[in-house]
Amino acid sequence: MYYTDDSDSQFYGQFITYKIAKGDTLQSVSKKLNIDIQKLRRYHNMHCKLSDLIEGDFKHYSKFLILSPEKSQIESNVIIEKQVQKVIFGKDNKLPFVPRGISKEYSVKYTFEVGDKVDKMEMAVRVKWIATDKNKYHLFEIKRSLNLFIDDDEPDRMFDELGAKLVEVLFPLKIIVDEAGKWIDIYNYNEIVSRWEEKENEIFEYYKKDSKVSQELIRFIEYVLTSSDKLFEMLRSDYFLRSFFNGIHTTYRDDYFLNQEISFPIEKNVKSIFEIEQEVNPFLNDNNLIVVEQNGDYLNSVEGIDFSGKFWNGKYSAKYFLSSDSYFIENINLDCTIEYDEPIKISLIVEALKKEKAE
C-alpha cells in the first residue's frame, strides 16, 4: 500500500496518475502501459512539481507518474487512478457559502403521490445573487418560468392557469439568505403587493365565468399579502425554496456530521418534523462535487406520537451536490414520505442547466 502526504494528494489529484511501485523503472512502466518512453516523460514533466521531474529515470522518492488522459485507456490490472481530493472547509469545519457573482438556471421536477394518485410538474427556476451586506446576509432574486408542465402537458385546467397567474405576481421574488444559506426573509414584499394590485382585476375578469374559483383565489392572496410574515410563511411551503435555501452551509462536527430537527411541508398547513442526521463527505466525488446528505425519520409529535394513539412512519432523504469552486448547489435529489393510511410522498429533482457565471 502507498501513502502520500496531503500536499501530494491535493496536487496530483488534479491528474490521472500511475502509482509508482517498488522496482518500477521508466522503461518497465512504458512497456506495461504500451506508451513510448519519451511521451511518458514529456507529458509528466510538463505538469509535475519541479522536484519530481523525470530525467534518466524515476527518482528514488517518486510516487506518481502523470499520464495524458487520452493515453490512459490501458489494461485493467494496471493501477491508474485519479487521487481523491479533499473538500476545503472554513474555520471549525464550516462549509463555506460564497455565492458572490452566481447566476444559475435549474430544471425543477416535482412528483406528488397521495395513495395511488400521482401528479407531476416541471418548471425552470433562475437563482441570482445580487448583493451581500456587512453582516454576511445575501440578497437573491428568484425567477420562475410561466411555462409550467403538469403531467407532461401544458396546463389546461383553470386551477393550473390561475397558478401561472400567481407566478406573475410573486416572481421575481427577492429574498434574504443568511451566511449558512438559509432563507430568513422576503425583501421585495411591497413590490409584490403592487404587482397584485395591478393583476387583481385582470384575474377576476379573465375568470369571471367561474367567479367562485377566482374569488376564492383573490381572497386567499389578499389574506397572505396582508403582511410580509404571512407571505413568508406561505412561500415557505414551496418545495424548491424550502429545500434549496435550507442552511446546509453550516458548521459540522469533527466527523463531518450533525444532528438536527427540520420541518418539510409535505402536508398542506401542517409542519411535518423530521429528526435527521446530516453529513458532508470530506472528499469530492468522481465528478469533483461536494456531497451533502440528510437522512432521518418522521416525528409524529414532540414526543413521537400523536394524540390519536397512532404511530406513523416517515422518511426524509436529501442529497445535495455542490460545486467545489463556488460551494453552490448543482443538483438536489429529495424524497419525503409519511406512511399514513393513505401514504403521501414528495419527490424533488433539481438540476443545474448551465454553469454559474460571474456578473
Image: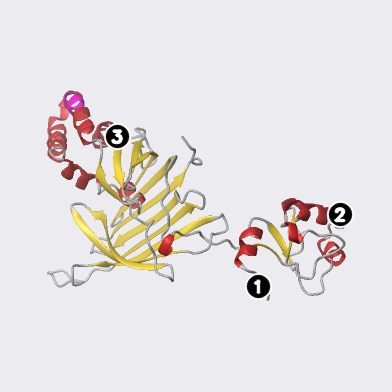
Q: Is residue 186 magenta?
A: no
Residue 172 lies, with reference to residue 296, above or below; the image says above
Magenta residues span: 197-201
The answer to whether 140 appears left or right of 289 in the picture is left
Q: Nearer the viewer, residue 49 or 13?
A: 49
Q: What separation in Å lies between label 1 and label 3 (alpha carbons)?
A: 53 Å
Type of amino acid under label 3: Phe
Percent across and percent down for residue 110 are 36, 48
Residue that appears at 82% across and 56% down: 41
Residue 165 lies, with reference to residue 16, above or below; the image says above
Percent across and percent down for residue 342 are 24, 60
* Residue 3: mark: 1
Per the image, the residue denoted by label 3 is 171
* Predominant secondary structure, magenta span: helix
SS class of the residue under badge 1?
Answer: loop
Sequence-wise, the earlier of marks 3 and 2 is: 2
Q: How is the image coloured?
A: secondary structure
Q: What separation in Å lies between label 2 and label 1 (alpha carbons)?
A: 27 Å
Q: Identify the residue at the far bottom of this view.
A: 1
Percent across and percent down for residue 173 are 29, 37
Per the image, the residue denoted by label 2 is 38
Type of amino acid under label 1: Tyr
Image marks 1 and 3: residues in contact by CB distance under 8 Å? no
Residue that appears at 44% across and 59% down: 90
Residue that appears at 25% across and 32% down: 169
Q: Quadrant of residue 30?
A: bottom right
